[in-house]
Image: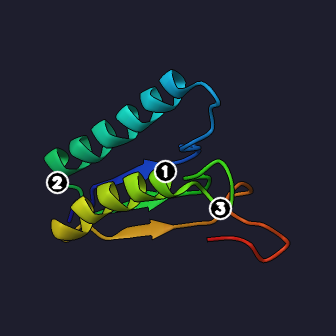
Amino acid sequence: MKIRFAHLSDCHLGAWRNEILNQMGYDAFTQTITNIIEENVDFVIISGDLFDISNPKVDVLDLAVRELKKLHDKNIPVYGIMGSHDFSPSDNSM
């Protein structure tokens, strides 16, 4: 039995002050989700730092949720591991 999975790491969505650079990151993430669906993988692993900060802006969070929902709608499980940018020691993490 062959298992096919996608591995994402260090996406750092919303990391840039320059909106053009942010948009490039968003476009890359969106295209990656499209590719994952086209490749019909069995599951996805996100091994940390999906966002650049532990409390991302609403528009950044909305983009991530919208794209990850596409995987959910195709019954592709997503397993996430918190990275250093996903966690806040002050209990303010998503």
Contact between marks 1 and 3 (CB within 8 A): the answer is: no
Element type where label 2 sits in the image: loop
Horizontal and vertical percent position of residue 49: 62, 52
Q: CA separation, marks 1 and 2?
A: 25 Å
Q: CA distance from mark 2 to mark 3?
A: 31 Å
Relative to the observer, which residue lies in front, 57 or 91? 57
At 38% from the left and 62% from the top, the residue drawn is 65
Q: Is residue 91 left or right of residue 43?
A: right
Picture residue at 55% right of the left edge, 53% below the top = 50
N-terminal-most mark, 1 or 2: 2
Report the residue at 27% width, 55% height from top.
4
Q: Residue at x 53, y 43 (%)?
A: 11
Q: Amino acid at mark 3?
A: Asn
Specify the quadrant of the image occupied by residue 87.
bottom right
On residue 60, which mark appears?
1
Q: Which residue is mark 2?
A: 40
Count of all numbered marks drawn on residues in the image: 3
Q: Quadrant of the N terminus?
A: bottom left
What residue type is disc 2 on? Asn
Location of residue 51 in the rendering, given as x and y in whole percent from the top left corner: 58, 52
Mark 1 vs 2: CB contact within 8 A = no
Q: Is residue 92 above or below residue 52?
A: below
Circle 3 packing at 10 Å, graded few (<14), some (14-19), many (20+), is some
First in sequence: mark 1 vs mark 3: 3
List the residue tagged with mark 3. Answer: 55
Residue that protrudes farthest toward the bottom in the picture: 91
